């Protein structure tokens, strides 16, 4: 069976390209696949009739007890024969139906084969989850098939409708399937059915959920509306969909479960009720259709209701009748759809008001259609007659044995049969009769090859009707798995009815009488068709669930838009506020439920905290209210330095050191960027917004203080960090516990952090370097290689102070010839590239003197950090500050001279270095990041130690230096350059404070930095 | 463990000021708010770390219990450096926004605002009905070999 499935899958994959290339005749070849499977299935019949069940088992996910389990019991064999037999004929028919070059024919052919394969898989699966997967696969493929005419809006809508309705049912079914599998302790369908779990409320719910899936798939009221819409599909698809596949899946599932769950509370009343209603609604609607295909579609709805009643009824003889009816329906309904396809193909219409005299023009077609219609109406000697007789007999005998529901079902299906006869007559009359007042159709001539498929099917309807006793052994074996009487009847009656047998002639039985009556009434109904249609026009549609469906879809669409509009306002502050309000509400609720606050208070750890806290608090409030950019930055900086002081008081020396250094670098970075922005912070919301913001802010503050108290009070266990000192000293060979933690014990964390820094630095560079990828620092070079703007500046820089103080507006190229004034020896290499009024000789001298000392200090911090406060972070920051000083004192060329290496390379190298250090131990057979140390007595220097984790710290150091350089070259040097670019054309770059000109023109703010600009940045860098 | 009231109050003030700034529309304010919230969070970890102690450096005669807890210190140190990296990134963002759009103020997202106005233009394809089967819907209308008159 798995081979058959693989065959279908391969055909589905290969066929699209073949059909696209060779046209529709490839369908004839493709039909060989289902035909071969059909033939193989025929060969299995003797074994199955003998009582054997061919099975196949391929383990799939053993851990989930999921297996590709297949079996051929009488029911699945019958279904598989229908699926492959009708499938082969439909595929064959496609070869004549479609024309070469039709849009999407390749896709269609592949999907059709895949659909047939999924349907085949569905009926032979013995694993309930695999069955469900095939179930959903048929849904998806049918969506593609119904929507074949992608250009038609109606076609797309119908496909979506079918998909939504059947998937919704499928989801309900999945829940039921899971419950059933869990309660049974197995996923094998055969085992579940053979030994069903004990009846309970849960099982009832599960069974009803599965039924919901089956009923939606089989288009039962009120979910029937998708099936008539689905006739937007090409007619061969409709034929297959309505007769053998998709809708039959639901019926199959009911037939599969009825032996085990037929007595589940609610099963029989539900299926009989819905089935009868569907049969009547479908038949009634079919009577008013003018489109032949739509007439058949409603006929299918009606027949599916019929099948639901009979198959779901759950007695032995009803089951026999049901499986016969499934077969009969597959044969005649496929035939009729294929006939309609031929009519449409030939005449270009399916409207019975436009067709006349076709019977005379196309007698063969008329004969084929009449045979199938006779089976549908239940006329002897067709298979449909045999099935209907069996149905009436089975329902009647259960009613006679005391089941009132049997009588309800009998009356229902008898009424439904009356309608069936009527719409069958309407179909035949509509398609073939000569109608007065309508010009006879001109049917070109009959193509026998086009007729092959429907003719075979029609002959089968006839042949199997006559030879129905031959079906008895196979069908009877399935029927025997169902109890002889319904629960109601067996409670009343002790005797059981005899097992029925399929035959054309049972003698003069009540069933024959019922058949005759329905026939007469049906023909009468047809004869009175004008009066009936007048009544139908007046009676409003009672069950108009299609409108309900569209209303639901519309509501969902509107709801989605409303929800989006409600939540996605597009305002960042509102998003942030939402997050914070949720934080306060959620965590606040949790804390409120905690009740009492654990822990106790003391005013302070040391009295010195109080003044620091007051300064920080005041600075915070002032920063929140500040209107000047620099003012706010400095105030926030104050809190940062305050943090450093608090760290120091608390005994966290490393933190204090790092915080102070970071704060300084941050301040410089701020100033580098903010010099380009107006000094006043942009406008803000009105008063009401400020109040809301303040309320949220204060709530968060209060919440977090409660969190702090509760968290602190909850610390009752001994912290693991008590063992860190020992661990650091013995394992990491370092005395500074924090440093060892960073580079050794929690080294992976630090590696991750370094990656964050690299990403941030890369981000900074890519945001600032707008138009070019610059990796090189600007450097002092030979005169000839200097860019034009540099030469210009150089001339300006070399001019004597006295001359250039007034030369601000000197146009480019017109610099006065004051080369004589190059007397001052620069303290820094690039000092002379600056405009004289921007130079500070004192700063240059100080930087010159301090730079190398600072680098030495940074290296000392790096290496000593293992034992005293310091380490890679602090060392890197000190080195970074040294570069900052060089840049501030002498501009971007100085930066290039001080650090000729590319920042990006430094960053990458740092991460590689640290990562490499972390990984090297693996090659020595120990865990990553394991450290070791060497010590030696060296002459002169004395005792030295070296711990390998210092190498990791060097990586950290490189990354931090790289970050600092990256910030300087991006936010410093590149912004300088862009600024000159912006100004270069209209004015001299040396006209005062950088950026002031631009700021002045853009906003009406003072162009001088505010007085509270920190001293280091008072002179903007050049 | 008992908590230092001064530190807790300071932390609350830092959070309040930080959140207040964070909720503004000016990018500079948001960045400053981010820094304040960062400081407040570091302070939170410091408070939870417990009372003051000696620097966590192994020396003779110093018991681990006398030291300030080194683990939160390592966490804060990481946080400080990362905050620095992220603020540099945000500063670059501010600069770019200023250079390209001359704006320091975040405006509402246009695409999101546009969704709000799209309500009336929903395409309710699904409401298309096939219930009243009209005979015109045929697959072969113009292509059939013999057309009906």
Image (tube, grey):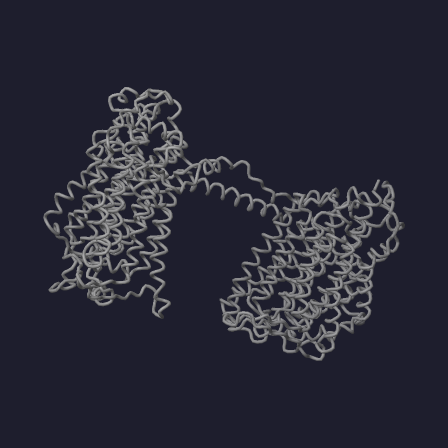
Image quarter of the C terminus of chain A = top left
Viewer-closest of A895 and A573? A895
- Residue A816, placed above or below residue A228: above
- Residue A272, placed above or below residue A974: below
Considering every residue shown, the one lying at the far left of the view is A607
Q: Is residue A325 visible?
A: no
Viewer-closest of A1012 and A2? A1012
Viewer-closest of A1013 and A533? A1013
In which quadrant of the rendered view does residue A798 lie? top left
In which quadrant of the rendered view does residue A121 lie? bottom right
> Residue A56: x and y, percent?
63, 74
Considering every residue shown, the one lying at the far right of the view is A360
Total labels drawn: 0
> Residue A169: x and y, percent?
57, 57
Image quarter of the N terminus of chain A = bottom right
Horizontal side of A468 relative to A13 (left or right) equals right
> Residue A237: x and y, percent?
71, 54
Considering every residue shown, the one lying at the far front of the view is A820
Horizontal side of A364 relative to B80 (left or right) equals right
Horizontal side of A165 relative to A605 (left or right) equals right
- Residue A1003, placed above or below residue A334: above
Residue drawn at 58 percent across, 52 percent down: A164
């Amino acid at each position: 069976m798995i081979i058959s499935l693989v065959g279908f899958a391969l055909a589905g994959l290969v066929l699209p390209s073949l059909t696209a290339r060779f046209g529709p005749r490839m369908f004839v070849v493709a039909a060989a696949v289902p035909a071969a499977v059909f033939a193989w299935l025929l060969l299995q019949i003797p074994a199955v009739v003998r009582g054997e069940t061919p099975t196949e088992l391929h383990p799939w996910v053993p851990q989930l007890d999921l297996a590709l389990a297949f079996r051929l019991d009488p029911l699945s064999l019958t279904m598989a024969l229908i699926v492959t037999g009708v499938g082969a004929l439909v595929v064959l028919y496609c070869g004549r139906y479609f024309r070469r070059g039709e849009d999407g024919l390749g896709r269609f052919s592949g999907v059709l084969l895949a659909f047939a394969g999924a349907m085949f898989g569905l009926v032979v699966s013995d694993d309930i989850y695999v069955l469900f997967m095939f179930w959903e696969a048929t849904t998806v493929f049918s969506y593609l098939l119904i929507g074949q005419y992608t250009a038609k809006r109606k076609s797309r809508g119908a496909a979506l409708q079918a998909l939504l309705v059947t998937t919704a049912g499928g989801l309900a079914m999945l829940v039921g399937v899971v419950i059933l599998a869990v309660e049974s302790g197995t996923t094998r369908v055969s085992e579940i059915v053979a030994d069903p779990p004990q009846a309970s409320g849960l099982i009832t719910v599960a069974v009803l959920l599965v039924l919901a899936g089956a009923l939606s798939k089989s288009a039962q009221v009120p979910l029937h509306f998708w099936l008539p819409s689905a006739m937007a599909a090409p007619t061969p698809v409709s034929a297959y969909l309505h007769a053998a596949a998709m809708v039959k899946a639901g019926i199959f599932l009911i037939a599969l479960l009825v032996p085990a769950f037929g007595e589940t509370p609610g099963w029989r009343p539900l299926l009989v009720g819905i089935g009868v209603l569907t049969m009547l609604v479908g038949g009634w609607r079919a009577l008013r259709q003018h489109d032949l295909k739509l007439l058949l579609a409603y006929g299918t709805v009606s027949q599916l209701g019929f099948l639901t009643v009979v198959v779901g009824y759950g007695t032995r003889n009803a089951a026999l009748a049901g499986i016969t009816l499934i077969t009969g329906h597959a044969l005649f309904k496929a035939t009729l759809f294929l006939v309609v396809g031929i009519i449409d193909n030939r005449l270009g219409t399916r409207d019975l008001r436009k067709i006349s005299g076709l019977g005379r023009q196309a007698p063969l077609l008329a004969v084929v259609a009449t045979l199938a219609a006779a089976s549908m109406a239940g006329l002897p000697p067709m298979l449909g007659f045999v099935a209907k007789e069996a149905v009436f007999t089975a329902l009647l005998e259960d009613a006679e044995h005391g089941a009132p529901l049997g009588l309800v079902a009998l009356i229902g299906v008898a009424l439904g049969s009356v309608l069936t006869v009527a719409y069958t007559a309407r179909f035949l009359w509509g398609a073939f009769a000569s109608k007065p007042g309508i010009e006879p159709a001109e049917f070109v001539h009959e193509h026998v090859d086009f007729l092959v498929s429907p003719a075979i099917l029609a002959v089968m309807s006839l042949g199997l009707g006559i030879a129905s006793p031959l079906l008895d052994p196979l069908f009877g074996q399935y029927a025997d798995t169902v109890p002889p009487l319904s629960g109601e009847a067996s409670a009343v009656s002790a005797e059981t009815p005899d097992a029925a047998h399929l035959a054309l002639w049972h003698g003069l039985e009540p069933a024959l009488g019922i058949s005759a009556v329905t026939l007469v009434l049906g023909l009468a109904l047809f004869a009175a068709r004008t009066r009936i249609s007048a009544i139908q026009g007046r009676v409003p549609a009672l069950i108009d669930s299609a409108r309900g469906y569209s209303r639901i879809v519309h509501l969902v669409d509107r709801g989605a838009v409303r929800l989006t509009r409600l939540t996605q306002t597009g305002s960042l502050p509102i998003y942030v506020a939402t997050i914070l309000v949720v934080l306060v509400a959620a965590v606040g609720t949790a804390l409120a439920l905690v009740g009492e606050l654990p822990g106790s208070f003391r005013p302070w750890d040391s009295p010195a905290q109080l003044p620091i806290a007051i300064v920080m608090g005041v600075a915070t409030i002032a920063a929140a209210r500040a209107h000047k950019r620099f003012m706010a930055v400095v105030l926030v900086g104050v809190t940062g330095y305050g943090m450093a002081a608090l760290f120091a008081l608390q005994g966290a020396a490393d933190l204090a050191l790092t915080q102070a250094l970071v704060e300084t670098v941050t301040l410089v970075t701020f100033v580098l960027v903010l010099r380009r922005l107006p000094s006043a912070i942009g406008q803000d919301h009105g008063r009401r917004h400020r109040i809301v913001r303040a309320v949220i802010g204060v709530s968060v503050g209060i919440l977090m203080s409660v969190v702090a108290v509760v968290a602190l009070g909850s610390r009752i266990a001994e912290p693991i960090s008590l063992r860190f000192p020992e661990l650091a000293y013995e394992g990491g060979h370092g005395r500074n516990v924090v440093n060892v933690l960073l580079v050794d014990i929690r080294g992976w964390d630090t590696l991750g952090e370094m990656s964050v820094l690299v990403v941030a630095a890369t981000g900074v560079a890519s945001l600032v370097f707008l138009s070019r990828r610059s990796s090189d620092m600007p450097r002092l070079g030979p005169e000839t290689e200097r860019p034009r703007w540099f030469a210009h500046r150089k001339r300006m820089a070399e001019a004597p102070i006295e001359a250039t103080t007034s030369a601000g507006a000197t146009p480019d190229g017109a610099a006065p010839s004051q080369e004589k004034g190059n007397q001052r020896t620069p303290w820094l290499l690039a000092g002379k590239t600056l405009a004289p009024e921007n130079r500070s000789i004192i700063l240059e001298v100080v930087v010159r003197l301090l730079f190398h000392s600072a680098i030495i200090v940074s290296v000392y911090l790096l290496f000593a950090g293992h034992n005293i406060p310091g380490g890679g972070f602090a060392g890197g920051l000190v080195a970074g500050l040294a570069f900052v000083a060089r840049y501030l004192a002498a501009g971007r060329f100085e930066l290039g001279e001080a650090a000729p290496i590319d920042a990006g390379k430094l960053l990458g190298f740092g991460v590689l270095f640290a990562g490499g250090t972390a990984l090297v131990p693996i090659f020595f057979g120990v865990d990553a990041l394991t450290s070791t140390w060497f010590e030696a007595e060296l002459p002169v220097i004395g005792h030295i130690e070296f711990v390998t984790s210092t190498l990791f710290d060097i990586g950290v150091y490189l990354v931090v230096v790289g970050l600092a350089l990256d910030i300087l070259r991006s936010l410093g040097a590149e912004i300088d350059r862009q600024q000159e670019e912006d100004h270069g054309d209209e004015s001299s770059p040396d006209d005062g404070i950088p950026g002031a000109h631009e700021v002045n023109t853009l906003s009406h703010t003072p162009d001088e930095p505010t007085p509270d600009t920190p001293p280091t940045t008072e002179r903007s860098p050049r | 463990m008992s908590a230092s009231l001064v530190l807790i109050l300071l932390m609350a003030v830092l959070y309040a000021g930080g959140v207040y700034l964070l909720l503004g529309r000016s990018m500079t304010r948001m960045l400053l708010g981010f820094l304040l919230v960062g400081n407040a969070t570091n302070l939170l970890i410091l408070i939870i770390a417990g009372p003051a102690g000696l620097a966590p450096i192994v020396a003779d005669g110093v018991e681990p219990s006398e030291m300030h807890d080194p683990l939160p210190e390592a966490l804060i140190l990481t946080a400080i450096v990362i905050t620095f990296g992220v603020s540099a990134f945000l500063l670059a963002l501010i600069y770019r926004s200023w250079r390209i759009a001359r704006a320091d103020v975040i405006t509402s997202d246009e695409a999101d605002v546009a969704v709000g106005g799209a309500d009336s233009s929903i395409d309710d394809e699904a409401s298309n009905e096939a219930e009243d089967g009209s005979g015109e819907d045929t697959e072969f209308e113009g292509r059939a070999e013999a057309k009906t008159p």
